[in-house]
Every structure is written in structure tokens, then in C-alpha cells.
Image (cartoon, rainbow, N blue to C red):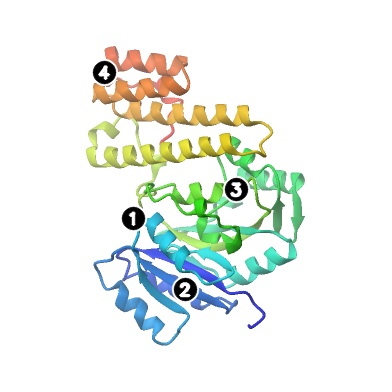
Amino acid sequence: MRDEPLVSVIIPTYNRADIITSSIQSVIDQTYRNWELIVVSDCCSDHTKEVVESYSKSDPRIRFIVNNRTKGVGGARNCGLLSAQGSYISFLDSDDQWFPYHLQDSIQMLGDSRSDICFALWEEHHGATVYQSYNNEVEQRLLDEMRAQYETKGDAIIIEHGLMERFVLNPRHFYSINSMVLKKRLLQPSDLFNEQFSIGEDTSFIIRFFDRCRIALITKPHFIYNQSPDSVYLFCDRRLLDPDTLCLQQELLDKIEFVGLQTINMRLEMQALVRRSPHLGNRKRLEQEIKYMLARQYYTLSYIHKLNKRKAVRYCFLSMRYSFNAFNLLLLSHIVFGGSKRSDFLRKPLNLW
């Protein structure tokens, strides 16, 4: 173990005393042994501290600290980053679990492929249902395309150039903060998590490395993502939502609006990153695609607020700012003159994700 680099594992948590034990145990069960675990309390009001300290009493590798920065997952992760002693950094959410081989395989791949950052795929658990989203035809075809385009090493795809372009232009992606293992020396002062974001702070953090690092993507699952009813993002099955009746469910509508606005902020940050990057060859196309994403997000917010004409009109004008097209022009007319009537044509550009 002396020759193995120290990996700092950061778990941000808020009032997860009843479920965090499985996350901590999944770190303890790692076949890679040289790690430190930093559990960052985002000012928990339950007995999370006692739970963590029951582990740290018998395992000095485990520490409990309290977030002294902005409240929220971004501030908590930054607090952990600034306390980390390891040569490598990794993250895990307090309701998810790693498979025992995660750190071992990731560190091994980083060395074998001479990469700076490693990612891996994951399983999704929805109650008793286990869902491997990357086993379907679409994702497998995308992974095969990436294998053909980039270097490979064992079961990993090695990407040195072009990942930012692929990420912006393809809405499906394979990069999760919970599988990320990166060299700490890569971090610059500007690379901390954006503490203003309630969601999307992980994506905002990850994409900063896409055009300046060599990245390995291991194409087997390394962690279990558990869908939680109190998740800020995945609080419902959006495939079952009816955009025309959302306006009648105020609590759900407010959540969808909040997530939509946070997503817009993340995409605005992505837009600024694309504009600053010196390595992109097709910057104009990427900026156009991001503008389309922004227009579509505002369009969706406008559509689902049809009963609130003032808000719906405001979101529709914001959509037009980024892409003036027949859809948002007709939606504006529909809001002003059509009220709450359903329109299958106007539903086509909607994106509730």
C-alpha cells in the first residue's frame, strides 16, 4: 500500500443518516486500500455526525467535517476538496454506492493509459428495478462510434481531443461525478464547484477538463445510482409527465421550473467556457447548438406556464432571444389567443429534462 497514491474520497451529505452507511461501507469495501474518506456535512440537523464518527473511531481514514462555505452540494464538495490530502480526488453521493473494484480499476487505468482523469459507467436502481441504461442499442452504438474514433485501452476509451465538441453536440453522455477520479494537481483556483448552482454543479465542474486533459472512460459500471424521491433533479419519472396538465400541479410545476432555470444557468456557463477555450475548431457550431438548447429550455418553460400568461410570454420572448423560429412565434400566439388548448405541433420541441 505504501507505493499506492492516496485517493481522497469526498462525500457531501445533508440529513442522510439513515442511508449514508451503505455509501461509507462501499468505500471501506474497496480493493484499493490507500484512501481517505471525507464526509462533509452540509449543516445536517439529524444524527449524521454520530453515524460517521462511529466509523472513524475504528478507521482513522474516515473524517467528518462541516461545510464552512456556501450551503449546498457545491459548497460542501469544495470544502472537501480544500481539505483533501490525496494525490487523486474522487466523489460519491451519500445515497449511492461504488462497486468494490472502482478505485483499483480507475487508478490502474489512469496509469496504464497515461490519462489525467478516469470515468466509468453505472447502474441505476429504481426501487427493486435495476436498470443498465448503457446496454440499449442507441448507447452501445455511440460507444462503438467512440471506440472507432478514439484510442482504446482494454475496456476503456481514451479521449485526448474533441470531447467538448462531442458533449455539446450529442445530448447523451457517459460522465458522472460519482465515477470521476482525477489527479489533484490538475485543479486550478478557478476549478472549484460553482456554489451558486443547486443542480448542474457537477456537469459544470466536469466539462472544464474536457478540452485540456487526457480522459479515460471505462465502459463497465463502477457505481450504483439510486433514484431518490427527494432528489433535486430526478424527483419524478419525466417520461410520464403531461406538459398540458403540469400547470394544474403547482408543486410539481415549481420543481420543474426550478430545475429548468438551473439547467439554463449551467448551459450559460458552458457557453462562456466554449467561448474562452483556445482548443475548439468548430466554436461557431457549438455556440449555435448551445443557443438552441437555451431557446428550447425557455420554450418548454413558456409552454408549461400557459395559464400564467405573463410568465409564459416572458419565457417565450427569452426563447426568441436565442433562436427566433416558427415554434416560439406560434407559441406566443397560442398563449395570447389560445389559452390552455392542447397543441401536438407545439409540443414537439419540448424538453422536460
CA gap, disc 2 and disc 4: 54 Å
Front disc: 2 or 4: 2
In depth, the one of 319 and 249 nearer the eye is 319
Q: Secondary structure at mark 1?
A: loop
Q: Is residue 128 visible?
A: no
Which residue position is annotated with label 2?
Answer: 37
Give residue 27's position: percent from left, percent from top: 50, 74
Question: 109 above or below 310?
Answer: below
Q: Secondary structure at mark 2?
A: strand
CA gap, disc 3 and disc 1: 40 Å
Viewed as shown, does residue 145 lie left or right of 320?
right
Viewed as shown, does residue 172 lie left or right of 316?
right
Which corner quadrant of the image does residue 218 belong to?
bottom right
How packed mark 1 is, by other alpha carbons closer than 10 Å (few <14, some 14-19, many 20 or more), is some
CA gap, disc 2 and disc 3: 34 Å
Q: Secondary structure at mark 3?
A: loop
Question: At 38% across and 41% down in the image, what residue appears?
Answer: 262
Viewed as shown, does residue 118 lie left or right of 296?
right
Question: At 42% across and 72% down in the image, what residue appears?
Answer: 22
Give residue 279's position: percent from left, percent from top: 67, 39
Q: Secondary structure at mark 4?
A: loop
CA gap, disc 3 and disc 4: 40 Å
CA gap, disc 1 and disc 2: 21 Å
Q: Is there a contact, CB below 8 Å, between mark 2 and mark 4?
A: no
Which residue position is annotated with label 3?
Answer: 136
- State the residue lying farthest toward the bottom: 58
Q: Amino acid at mark 4?
A: Gly
Q: Amino acid at mark 2?
A: Leu
In depth, the one of 6 and 314 nearer the eye is 6
In depth, the one of 86 and 240 nearer the eye is 86
